[in-house]
Image (spheres, rainbow, N blue to C red):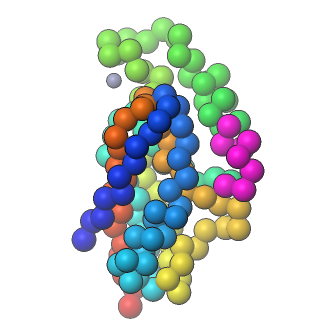
């Protein structure tokens, strides 16, 4: 079974912490042990896991990605959102987290981020759990 997590981004570039949404989905599915796969079915948004405790970390990642892939660079894609496509590819479109005793096995400081690069838009993340029981 695949579960969809709806996401509404509010800015052009935005890192949205979806950790609670993912944990809630695990709770609803009543999964105690297994692997949770997350997939972003978009071409200008990605997903990453990084520090959730200090918000300046995600700000630094956002800012450095803009330096790496500037908005005013020379691009071929006529839609005008090449920087968003490139940044999404750099971060990737999928991740996985192990589950033990019904909890996502994230590190103490880790959060799961949906990474918007061409917002604001209505988005979604697909979640699939492989149960180990
Ligand atoms: Zn495009």
Quadrant of the rendering where the C terminus is positioned: bottom left
Numbered range of the magenta stretch:
52-59
Figure disc tally:
0
Residue depicted at 48% across the width and 47% down the height: 114
Q: Is residue 106 left or right of residue 11?
A: right
- Image: 93 above or below 11: below
Secondary structure mostly seen in the magenta stretch: helix
- Image: 93 above or below 74: below
Residue depicted at 38% across the width and 83% down the height: 30
In the image shown, does 58 or 82 lie closer to the viewer? Answer: 58
Image quadrant of ligand 1 equals top left
Residue depicted at 64% across the width and 22% down the height: 67
Quadrant of the rendering where the N terminus is positioned: bottom left
Residue 37 in the image: state x and y as whole percent: 40, 64
Whether 10 is among the magenta residues is no
Residue 75 in the image: state x and y as whole percent: 43, 12
Residue 34 in the image: state x and y as whole percent: 43, 79
Q: Is residue 63 left or right of residue 41?
A: right
In the image shown, does 68 or 12 lie closer to the viewer? Answer: 12
Q: Is residue 96 left or right of residue 1?
A: right
Residue depicted at 45% across the width and 71% down the height: 24
Residue 49 in the image: state x and y as whole percent: 58, 54
Residue furthest out toward the bottom: 133
In the image shown, does 35 or 8 lie closer to the viewer? Answer: 8
- Image: 128 above or below 9: below
Q: Is residue 106 visible?
A: yes
Q: Is residue 90 visible?
A: no
């Amino acid at each position: 079974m695949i579960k969809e997590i709806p996401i509404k981004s509010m800015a052009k570039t935005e890192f949205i912490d979806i950790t609670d949404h993912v944990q809630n989905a695990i709770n609803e599915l009543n999964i105690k042990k297994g692997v949770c796969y997350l997939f972003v079915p978009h071409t200008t948004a990605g997903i990453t896991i990084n520090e959730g405790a200090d918000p300046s970390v995600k700000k630094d990642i956002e800012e450095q990605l803009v330096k790496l892939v500037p908005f005013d660079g020379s691009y071929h894609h006529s839609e005008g959102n090449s920087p968003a496509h490139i940044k999404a590819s750099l971060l990737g479109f999928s991740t996985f987290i192990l589950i033990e005793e019904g909890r996502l096995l994230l590190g103490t400081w880790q959060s799961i981020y949906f990474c918007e690069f061409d917002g604001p838009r209505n988005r979604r993340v697909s979640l699939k759990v492989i149960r180990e029981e």
